[in-house]
């Protein structure tokens, strides 16, 4: 009678088995689609951050050149903040998205940039676009 | 037996508008008020009456949310929804705007002077806290922009004797800041409130901090230094803060302001249920686990939300309050004798 039991088993449990197999296939496909979507999202978000910090760095380098020629006392305070910003940007671990203090360090960089703008009396008005910036006249 | 809070007088400080905040000058002789009408008014007494001595009307384009006197009493700072902070210099009865501090991206919610008079702090809906330094020539310079909070920052207050700053936020936390190697850093985060923290007040000694919240509680926090006797853990050389008391069940709505009297130690609260309450620490209660009792409760102190309570720094028991109804009121608080 063992042969008879196997035959009925296959028919009776078919529904359950297909459900399980279907779920498994769906789960795997969903996971790989999720990884692709996550990667795209990460690329865009990472580019935005990189672009923002790149702006700050360019701004800081330009001002460092401008202030280098002058050596007044109040400029030395500005230089100190400038150098501090440049140093923070250079120390930032660009290659490690799992860095524990990522948001905290980003916050410090943004804060230092704002402070620098306040000291230089410059209003920051950068348009950071994902499409890439171009020169317009 | 409940102690008493007696009404001394009411003044329509900002008619047809909200009165947002009140600040006594260091000698307790003048009271600054600010409101939704974009004005700051300076009040003084003439006999038994409060009269308006000055109106500062050209400073701001939008609501003035807070005002603060410098420790010397010669300057007044006003924080506005127009994203600026004005510094006014007092010249007898006149006030002149000497500087406008810009930089915040949107509404400035609070401003506070450090006890040294050299530092000023501002905070905003842009989630940041700014620390400014002022020199002898009245030049202001930004020394730090702190992005520690994750939401709107509602209030900033300085420690009465140390150069330490506290901030309260819509993110339900209180943060403390100190200067470390030429830069300001967040040295502690106080978690516990279940909703927006609206205001803060240090006790006269600076060892304890009171916070009030949208969660309808007042929390008292105590500072523990590394190596403390009570065995409270500290990380490195930073002090630790622990919540040592929670006052719940007393307020039926959001608590918008709290004030700790430097003369008597009494704690007053301003509530969204239009009432003013006063609490005092029970004598003989354990300093590590203090208990506070409600000693005065005045329902309908105003006809709308009470936004601010302020103890006079020189006259014991003199309390000022203001409300969304545009009025300001003066109260005499006294403990009734006989038990």
Image (cartoon, rainbow, N blue to C red):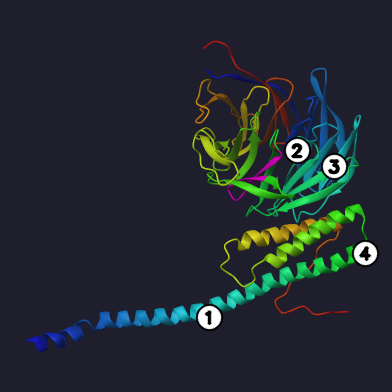
Q: Secondary structure at mark 1?
A: helix
**Magenta span dominant secondary structure:** strand
Residue A51 on image: x %, y %: 72, 72
Q: What is the crowding at mark 1: few (fewer than 14 residues within 10 Å), some, or many (at least 20)? A: few
Left-right relation of A76 to B294:
right
Residue A74 on image: x %, y %: 89, 53
Q: What is the crowding at mark 2: few (fewer than 14 residues within 10 Å), some, or many (at least 20)? A: many
Location of mark 2 (residue): B114
In the image, what residue occupies the spot 65% across and 71% down?
A94
Location of mark 1 (residue): A36
Q: Secondary structure at mark 4?
A: loop
Asked if badges 4 and 1 are on one and the same chain, I answer yes
* The residue stretch that appears in magenta: B163-177
Location of mark 3 (residue): B87
Residue A69's mark? 4
- Of labels 3 and 2, earlier in sequence is 3
Q: Chain of mark 2?
A: B
Mark-to-mark CA distance, 4 and 2: 36 Å
């Amino acid at each position: 009678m063992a042969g008879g039991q196997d035959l009925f088993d296959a028919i009776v449990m078919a529904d359950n088995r297909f459900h399980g197999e279907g779920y498994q296939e769906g789960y795997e496909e969903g996971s790989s689609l999720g990884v692709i979507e996550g990667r795209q999202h990460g690329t865009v978000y990472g580019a935005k951050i990189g672009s923002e910090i790149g702006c700050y760095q360019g701004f800081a380098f330009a001002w460092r050149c401008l202030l280098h020629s002058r050596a007044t006392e109040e400029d030395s305070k500005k230089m100190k903040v400038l150098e501090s910003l440049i140093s923070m940007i250079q120390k930032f671990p660009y290659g490690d998205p799992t860095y524990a203090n990522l948001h905290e360090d980003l916050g410090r960089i943004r804060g230092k940039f704002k402070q620098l703008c306040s000291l230089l009396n410059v209003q920051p008005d950068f348009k950071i676009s994902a499409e890439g910036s171009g020169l317009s006249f | 037996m409940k102690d008493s809070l007696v009404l001394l007088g009411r003044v329509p400080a900002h008619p047809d508008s909200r009165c947002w905040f009140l600040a006594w000058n260091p000698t307790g002789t003048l009271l600054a008020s600010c409101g939704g009408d974009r004005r700051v008014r300076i009040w003084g007494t003439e006999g038994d009456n409060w009269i308006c001595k000055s109106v500062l009307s050209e400073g701001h384009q939008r609501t003035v949310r807070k005002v603060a006197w410098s420790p010397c009493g010669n300057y007044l700072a006003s924080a506005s929804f127009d994203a600026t902070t004005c510094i006014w210099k007092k010249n007898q009865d006149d006030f002149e705007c000497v500087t406008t501090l810009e930089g915040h991206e949107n509404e400035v919610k609070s401003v506070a002077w450090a006890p040294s008079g050299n530092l000023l702090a501002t905070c905003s809906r842009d989630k940041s806290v700014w620390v400014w330094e002022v020199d002898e020539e009245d030049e202001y310079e930004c020394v730090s922009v702190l992005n520690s909070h994750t939401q709107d920052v509602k209030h900033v207050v300085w420690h009465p004797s140390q150069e330490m700053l506290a901030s309260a936020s819509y993110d339900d936390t209180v943060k403390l800041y100190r200067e470390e190697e030429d830069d300001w850093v967040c040295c502690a985060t106080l978690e516990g409130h279940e909703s927006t923290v609206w205001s803060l007040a240090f006790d006269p000694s600076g060892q304890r901090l009171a916070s009030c919240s949208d969660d309808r509680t007042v929390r008292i926090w105590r500072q523990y230094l590394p190596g403390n006797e009570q065995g409270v853990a500290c990380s490195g050389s930073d002090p630790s803060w622990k919540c040592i008391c929670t006052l719940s069940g007393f307020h039926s709505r959001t608590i918008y302001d709290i004030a700790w009297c430097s003369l008597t130690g009494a704690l007053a609260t301003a509530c969204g249920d239009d009432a003013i309450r006063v609490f005092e620490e029970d004598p003989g209660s354990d300093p590590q686990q203090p208990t506070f009792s409600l000693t005065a409760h005045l329902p309908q102190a105003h006809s709308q939300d009470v936004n601010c309570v302020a103890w006079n720094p020189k006259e014991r028991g003199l309390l000022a309050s203001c409300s969304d109804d545009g009025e300001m009121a003066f109260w005499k608080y006294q403990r009734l004798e006989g038990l």
